[in-house]
Image (cartoon, rainbow, N blue to C red):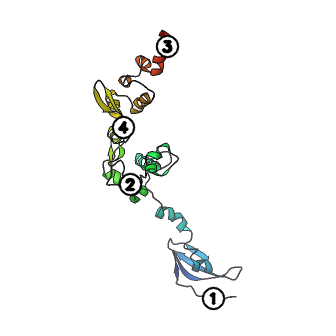
Amino acid sequence: MSRLIDETGNTYGRLTVTQPAGRDYRGTAMWECLCECGKTHIVNGTLLRSGRVKSCGCYKIDWPKLHKTTHGMNRKGQRHPIHRVWTGMKTRCYNDKEPCWKNYGGRGIKVCAEWQEFVPFMKWALANGYRPGLEIDRRDNDGDYSPDNCRFVTTVVNMRNKRNNHPITIGGETRILAEWAEISGLHHTLVLYRLRDGWDEEDLLVPVGTYHNYANPRVKKVLEEALV
């Protein structure tokens, strides 16, 4: 049997040794310890000195509170809009499976080191004009997502800053797609769909209804063929 090393009074993590507690079935010295939380715990001396046991078990419970972000913005079923902005930003830059990655991470656009964690981004957003309905926009479209290059803007302003803006001339006036959508009251996605589907530019803002069916190029083609 090995010689007993007196541990009385020594502190290991949250545990302070108070007195010997005999030996286990292998002959290893056991020690009674007082934890910082107030509980008494019997610990194997070898585990105590190696640092494998640091508390009565309360440390495992407290660890998430001490080391994980508890911002409350990503509770199941109720993600805060700011958290969606943050995850969307990181997805565009780092998930090469996303279709939009080619325009962000694929071009070398990154999220700055400070914003790799959510809480710093959340604090910046709240202090720099965030409100529901606004979108994050990079002033320099070739620059990274960082405090000195980002702002919160409306959809129209955000789309005006995109590389793939499409100027559309209607009635002799030229505007970008998002501006025409805002003026007409149509969703910009609908206007973009019509543009990609080959609609004439003068028909892009036709209200949804009976006449818009006749403006559809596929319907036009069928009618023209019927009149031949």
> Closer to the observer: label 3 or label 4?
3
Left or right: where 119 falls relative to 228: left
> Closer to the observer: label 2 or label 1?
2
- x, y percent for residue 82: 40, 48
187 shown above or below 211: below
Residue ID at (28%, 25%): 172
Left or right: where 135 falls relative to 6: left
Disc 2 to disc 1, C-alpha distance: 54 Å
- x, y percent for residue 43: 61, 77
75 shown above or below 166: below
Sequence-wise first label, 3 or 4: 4
Amino acid type at mark 1: Leu
> Closer to the observer: label 2 or label 4?
4
Mark 4 residue crowding within 10 angstroms, few (<14) / some (14–19) / many (20+) = few
Q: Which residue is mark 3?
A: 225
Callout 4 secondary element:
loop
Mark 1 residue crowding within 10 angstroms, few (<14) / some (14–19) / many (20+) = few
Callout 2 secondary element:
helix
> Closer to the observer: label 1 or label 3?
3
The residue nearer to you, when weighing 54 against 41, is 54
Mark 3 residue crowding within 10 angstroms, few (<14) / some (14–19) / many (20+) = few
Q: Which residue is mark 4?
A: 165
Q: Which residue is mark 1?
A: 4
Sequence-wise first label, 3 or 2: 2
Sequence-wise first label, 4 or 1: 1
- x, y percent for residue 155: 35, 39
Left or right: where 161 falls relative to 189: left
